[in-house]
Amino acid sequence: MQTQIDCFPCFLRQTIIALKQITDDPAVQEPVIREVISLIRDADTSRPPAYTTTFLHRLIRSRMGQDPFMHIKDVYNRLAMGLYPELKDRVRRSRDPLQTAARLAISGNVIDFGIFTSIDIENSIRQALEEHIAVDDYLSFRQDVAGAQEVLYLLDNAGEVVFDRLLIEELLRAGKKVKAVVKGSPVLNDVTASDATQAGLTDLCEIVDNGSDAVGTILEWTSPEFRSRYQSAELIISKGQGNFETLWGNGKETYFLFQSKCEVVSKELGLSPGSMLLKKS
């Protein structure tokens, strides 16, 4: 994907969302916003939007001296863990636990505070379980999972990681070895090692640090160790819109599970915003 004109106001909106996590003082916000505007002006539109988003969030963390999303990540990890027993029961009682777990993993992708200021988790769960999925390559997904021995699972957001746990548990139950990938350091409300621990993943599977603070997975900015794991991966499950932006068309056997949250990505896909996808590369 390439950056579009419609991405520019979104960059600024993301900046304001991040700053308001820390302060409502315009005198503190304004100098950072002015710097971000300069950064946006020089954005490389030949690259996916995630590149510019990464630069602006690095700037915000540097100027504010803290991770803007640290508190809200903890809040939604705890909220999702409170939902976990009921969601686990839904998976267990369903006719096809793997499909139900995959749909619940997609429903959890609504927890994205780089884009939304409020979310409706219950409605997202209902839509995923009861309504039509816009792109649903589940039959192929089930076959490819059955034929794989190992899965590299690219995590996305805090809170959402608990929904991913449901799918990871089904993969493990099917005898698959799962390696769950976290960010090397904070960016937005993306999953780091501490979030994976809070969601109980460290007791289930291997946790892999990608060595990067980039939005999505920008391979040239990840560690050599992660790139080696990525290139040798038998099957990849990729969560979130940022990973889709940066990894779509990479030639690897990948299933993208996410909700299309913006006009630019939705237009690229030929779908309406809010569409849910389980899409094979």
Image (cartoon, rainbow, N blue to C red):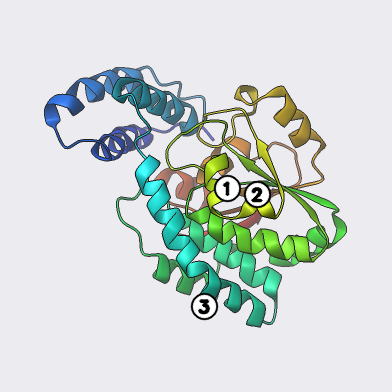
Under circle 3, the secondary element is: helix
Residue 271 seen: no
Q: Which residue has dot 1 on it?
A: 196
| Residue 90: quadrant of the picture | bottom right
Residue 202 is marked as 2
Which is nearer the N-term, disc 1 or disc 2? 1
- The residue located at (20%, 20%) in the rendering is 31
Looking at the rendered structure, the kind of residue marked 3 is Glu
Tell whether label 2 touches label 3 (CB within 8 Å).
no
Q: Nearer the viewer, residue 259 or 177?
A: 177
Please rate how many residues cluster around mark 3, counting C-alpha atoms within 10 Å: few if below 14, some from 14 to 19, many from 20.
few
Give the percent coordinates (x, y) of residue 207.
Answer: 67, 43
Which is nearer the N-term, disc 3 or disc 1? 3
Give the percent coordinates (x, y) of residue 229.
Answer: 77, 34
Which of label 3 and label 1 is nearer to you? 1
- The residue located at (24%, 25%) in the rendering is 33
Tell whether label 2 touches label 1 (CB within 8 Å).
yes
